[in-house]
Image (tube, helix red, strand yellow):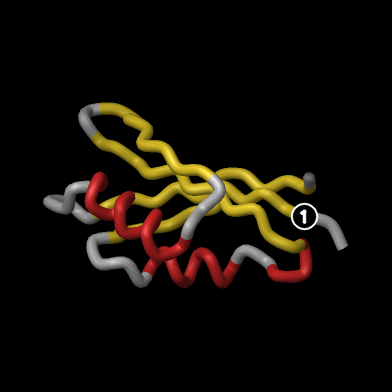
């Protein structure tokens, strides 16, 4: 089994500061990398990358990200074998 890098896009609810969600995710999940990206009209998305075993799958990460208060949507942006 190989390693997989999965990048998620995390969208905040209206009225929720994405920076606060970014800090919570970093503190609790220890991702490989994170960045804030503006997608237009002042809307920001958090891009979170995890490196994990191929057998683990990315679904568990997605479920954990959805549980953070203020998160509206999570989607897989990229996934590739390392």
Picture residue at 55% right of the left edge, 52% below the top = 76
Characterize the local packing of mark 1: few (<14), some (14-19) or many (20 or more) Cα atoms within 10 angstroms.
Answer: some
Does residue 76 appear to the left or right of 3 in the view shown? left
Q: Residue furthest right?
A: 1
On the rendered image, what quadrant is the N terminus found in? bottom right
* Residue 42 left/right relative to 58: left
| Location of residue 55 (image quadrant) | bottom right
Which residue lies most toward the left here? 15
Secondary structure, mark 1, is strand
Q: In this picture, is 67 found above or below 72?
A: below
Residue placed at 28% from the left, 54% from the top? 21
The residue lying at 31 percent from left, 59 percent from top is: 24
| Residue with the mark numbered 1 | 3
Using residue 64 as the reference point, say whether residue 24 is left or right of it.
Answer: left
Q: Residue 41: x percent and y percent?
A: 22, 28
Residue 52, image x, y percentages: 68, 59
Residue visible at 40% across and 65% down?
28
> Residue 38 location in percent, x, y?
32, 30
In this rendering, the count of numbered labels is 1
Using the image as rendered, state which of residue 80 and residue 30 is in the foreground. 30
**On the rendered structure, is 36 left or right of 29?**
left
């Amino acid at each position: 089994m190989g390693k997989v890098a999965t990048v998620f896009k995390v969208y905040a609810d209206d009225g929720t500061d994405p920076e606060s969600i970014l800090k919570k995710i970093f503190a609790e999940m220890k991702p490989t990398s994170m960045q804030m990206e503006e997608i237009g009209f002042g809307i920001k998305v958090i891009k979170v990358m995890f490196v994990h075993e191929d057998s683990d799958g990315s679904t568990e990460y997605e479920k954990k990200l959805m549980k953070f208060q203020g998160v509206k949507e999570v989607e897989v942006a990229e996934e590739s074998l390392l």
